[in-house]
Image (cartoon, rainbow, N blue to C red):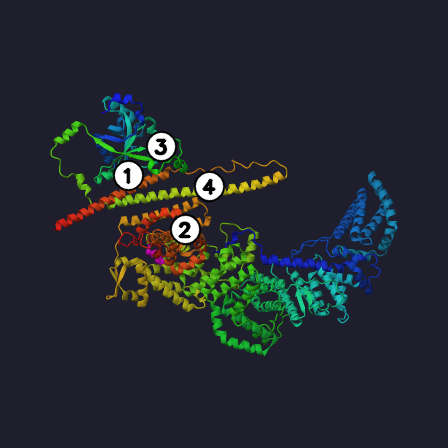
Amino acid sequence: MASRFWTAGSDSDEEEVDASEEENSSSEEESSSSSSSSSSGSDSSSDSDSDSDSDSDSDSDDSDAPKKGAARFLAGSDSDSDSDEDRRVVLKSAKDKRFSELTDTCDEIRNKMKINDWSAIQGLFDELNKRLERARKVSEAVGTPRVYVRMCVELEDFLNDTLANKDLKKKMSSTNAKALNTMRQRLKKHNTSDEFAEAVTKFRENPQEDEEEEEEEEESSSSSSESDTDGEREETEKRPAGAAKKKDKLLTMDSAEITYEMVAKKLREIVTSRGRKGTDKQEQVEMLQFLANVAKGVPQKLEVLLQLVGSLFDLSPGISNYMKVGLWKRCMLVMLEIMDTLQANEAIVLDDSAEPSEERTAEPVAGEDGKVRVWGNLVAFVERLDDEMFKSLQVIDPHTHEYMARLRDEPVFLALSQKVHDYLARIGDVRNQPKVALRLIEHFYYKTDAVYDAMRKLTMLQQHFYYKTDAVYDAMRKLTMLQQEEAAASAAAHPEGAVAAASAAAETAAAANTSNEPGEEQTADDKVALPVPLDFSMDESSTAAMKRLVGIVFTHGDERAKARAMLCTIYHKALHGDFHSARDMLLMSHLQDNVMLMDISTQILYNRSMAQLGLAAFRLGLISEAHSCLQELYGSGHIKELLAQGMAMGKFQDKTPEQELLEKRRQMPFHMHISMELLESSCLISAMLLEVPAMASSPLSVKKRVISKSFHRILDTYNRQTFTGPPETVRDHIMAATRALMRGDWSGAYGAVSALTVWQLVPQRESVLDMLKKQLKEEALRTYLFSYSAQYRSLSLDQLCTMFEMDEKAVYSIVSKMMIAEDLHGSWDQPTRTIVMHSIEATKVQSLAGQFADKATLMVELNERAYAFRTGGLRDDDDMGGGGGGRRGGRRGQDGQWEDDGGHGGRGRGRGPRLGAARMGLGQGGQDFGGHRRGGGGGGRGDRGGFRASGFSSNMTSGLPDRFQRRGPYRQQANPNMQALGSISRPGGGVGGGPGGGSYNRPLGGDRRDRGL
Amino acid sequence: MTTVADLLKRPDVKETVLKTVQLDGQVVLKIMQHCDGAQPSIVTGQLLGLDVGQTMEVTDCFPFPSPEDDGDSSTNYQLDMMRCLREVNVDNNTVGWYQSSVLGQYQTQEMIETFISYHDSIKKCVCIVYDPQRQQRGQLGLRAIRLKDSFIELFKEQKLTGKDLREAGVGWRDVFVEVPIKIHNSSLAQALIADLNPAPGATAGDLERLSLANAGYLSKTMANLIECMDDMLAEQGKVSMYHRNVARQQQQMAAWLQKRNQENIARRAAGEEPLPEEDPVLFKPIPEPSALDQYLVTSQIAGYCDMLGAAAEKGMAKMYLVQAAQKAAQH
């Protein structure tokens, strides 16, 4: 069952949402927690100028800051509330709103001043005063906002100018003049009142400084200037231009002088300003980096580092773009540092549920259990890093060195994830542990052994390169010696392997190069050196790694994680040729039942697993299994979309840009691709091997049992071609092979098939080709016998052996099987070692009678269904379980061989077993044959059928028995009829008829030669 | 012997059931000649005669011009012919029509419609179906067909859905009735035959009857049977489609009703007038498909099956006969 997710409407990436939620909540906490820091600024607007240089003052301000009630929560936010790329909602506090109102009104007044509209100015001035009141109420600030004071001063000046200008005054309209007079009086009173007089005079004394600070206010909207160091620092951050001249005090201070409090305060400040419009993120990152160096105590350092990671993430623009590689690497470095710290200090526990960094003035002491709790969410960071890496791989052109270079970063990421995972295991966080484990699994599952080894080698190489450890180097060397040839050969032979192996090779070369020229510059941003931690080592084999990680997910993970881990395991197993256990896992987990309900990326994973399962089956020579796995993926015509390996050019439906974007974000990176060509050839070859003998067995009714519709379509177009040149595409090759096979010419078919280039991508190329040769011979023999046995009186076994280059036993077994299945009407003549044909053409009447029986059965079946419908209590899909199910199943194609061709297939399937059942019923004296029916059908279908029935079409098998039971009364009626039909039909109709159930014209005495009709 | 006076005495003469159809020798010969000559196209003609109690006496007939001939005259032809026949003092009372058929195919909608149109004027009209192929195989391929009265009533009311037919108790066997045929010759003709001495030991018909080659016939019938099965399947499809539609509509209706119920509860709680719970506009009843075609196809199938059965039976008998003859020849 393929999951056709593109029809689904919305598809928000869950992880994405998760992550952003995480971010969101954290940012909210941060902002609330840190609001206290900036509140210090809001209290002292009037006296800030006077003691702007005193250090000590600021501390005292700080200490009483928390008392300031609501204001401390309001100060933290920003007036310009543009939501930034993290989708963070910035709340506009009431206070900010007031202030922005004030500013707006001031601007308006200024505008009116320009046009000399005094009546308007009067109104606005009233409004301004009102607003000031309100603002004061909210902010509880004592002082007057500078904006306001400045406005008053400006107004006064302007008023005086206007009054001095007599001409202007004369020109004014009466209302305007009146307003001017009122204003003059009011302003006079207003500005001289003791409330404002001081502020105004101060302003007049020092308008320059005021202006500067005002600007700052406008930018940051924090209510008033910060006192001393804080204010200055804020400036450095918020005004990048000014940063150069105004060096931060902290930066210049001796690190010994810096106290814990200072760092904590600064950190809070940064946290608060994070995400604001005016904030320079780059600046913040630098500051944080500096802080990390000077931080006092490990917990604080961790806090700073965690914040630094967050800020680094902020630097990358938007979710649609990927994070710059250099940035990513810096993130990785910081993360690794965090992990090292955590490893070194086991007492510290990172916890995203712990109370966020509260107001602390001293180094936190260990809690009761001897642990220090620090707020932080490593898992979210790891997930984000993984996503960013994924995104970058999606975007980078896979044929460039850049891509290779990017792939080389994978070991480091694996190391980090492993560390985080170990850490989580240590602190016993079973909730998050599976998340990281799943991330790791998703890095491992698609790797073949060769690729995995290459990756391991690469890891060691990197470790060696950066640490110059001889031990590692030796180990690496040994590994290289052992695996060089094999890895090179097989990795190059595999699609995914090619890239990784090449990258490993490139890395080797690079390592060699760099060791030769150690002086090579690596200063550029992109070239952040990213060493793999020394204590990281990958598991010996990917299987072991998978097993370990999957175990964790299965124990602790949620449903989705479990499903994904299961699919990854299936994929991995299939990739390693363990088809049967992969299949069992798939069937036992019943994933195919509910995969349609899962999110799209899981559906894609399911499709990938399915494809890989098919390829595994194909490699093992399980042709029909391979066909049922692949057929639907391939037959859908949307295989690219289904596997997320490229966008199909929408011929029929135009996608909206959003849809396209979403689809782009779903794409698999190149190194994870499953080769389309390989899929196509496997699918078509499987179809060919199944279809050609089937077509030969009933040449006149090709439409009767279509196994693979897509194959037929291709064959038809191929046959219609006026000129068939030498094969070029995969299809051409296989069609050429089909032609040869139809003549029973196995060597021609093999020639065409083996000429395909895709076999180079298969690791076990020789064995696969051998398998193909064997299969082709067998099917050619069958086809030959189907097509030409009528032309022979007898056929010598030896001749067949030489014709098909098969040994006697194999020929004997195939021919005997055909005789038993009544595909071949003949018998062995042992002494002469020949097959003696008993071919007798059925008469017209016989064949017609067969056809009639066919129709009659169909009618009986339909009647049964109609009856069941009338009696009610019938589930709809149970009802459809017969023909309808077949038809639907055919479209979905999941049921493989015998349901592919819609109506006919469904009919065929229904018919075969049912007639068999009728026979059984006869034998049992017409008693309940529901059970037997199944037994008959299932038994006849045998191994293959069992597989399909149990798995790919589970909905119908499960529906059958009770459906029959419920039909009690009708069955009795139908029985005579059925018996009649049964006696027309060949004994055991469906049982021997195989999956196709083509049992119709078996009947009528000894004449068996019906297929040739 | 019923006389005209007797007939007049009994006013319920029309209500009597038709028991036999009595064909005059010349009628049989005329029909055969016309139909055989026109093979393989299907031709029709008019039957003339008298309705006497339980017997329908057919004393004469004339062919209709085939539709390939000019169509204008065909309508007038019948009237002209009747007039002419009256002038020569032949029974000119129409009692039905005859038609040829191919392998016993006659159960069609048109047939019923013709019957109904005849029925308006002639209550007891019959149709003689002549099967030339059957004749060639040495059997008299004549059958007299009527529609059952109960069916006619239903048809006139167009109550032809499965439900109606079921309620009226009309099964597929109750559409057409076959009436026994009696061939009657005038005494003079009989005397002449008796006078022709002696009757030959075996006729050409006897010889034909012994023919062992019935494969063609069987396969032809089989093919027809298969065609009928296809028709049947199509009909079945219609019915199940109908059922599915009805079920779906019921589902929708239930959903709608539930919604309306809830709405009403809410409205009642809000003190508003509840909306009506019956909405005839929203859900129109889906018309049930006519069962007539099914009946016709079924009876056609039954006809074919009978034919096949008869043929097979005879074939077997002949086989035994031949076997016995061979044995006898060997001894």
Mark 2–mark 1 distance (CA, rounded to whole Å): 39 Å
- Residue A83 in the image: state x and y as whole percent: 67, 54
User: Is label 1 in a helix, a strand or a loop?
Assistant: loop
Q: Nearer the viewer, residue B188 or A906?
A: B188
Q: Is residue A696 magenta?
A: yes
Residue identified by numbered label 2? A964
Mark 1–mark 3 distance (CA, rounded to whole Å): 24 Å
Q: Amino acid at mark 1?
A: Gly
In the image, are marks 1 and 3 on the same chain? Answer: yes
- Residue A217 in the image: state x and y as whole percent: 77, 56
From which residue to which does the magenta span run?
A692-698
Chain at tag 4:
B
Dot 4 and dot 2 residues touching (CB under 8 Å) = no
Residue identified by numbered label 4? B246
Could you say which disc has been placed on residue B104 in the image?
Answer: 1
Bin the neighbour count of mark 4 within 10 Å (Cα to Cα): few under 14, some 14-19, many 20 and up. Answer: some
Dot 2 and dot 3 residues touching (CB under 8 Å) = no
Q: Nearer the viewer, residue A464 or B299?
A: B299
Bin the neighbour count of mark 1 within 10 Å (Cα to Cα): few under 14, some 14-19, many 20 and up. Answer: many
In the image, are marks 4 and 3 on the same chain? Answer: yes
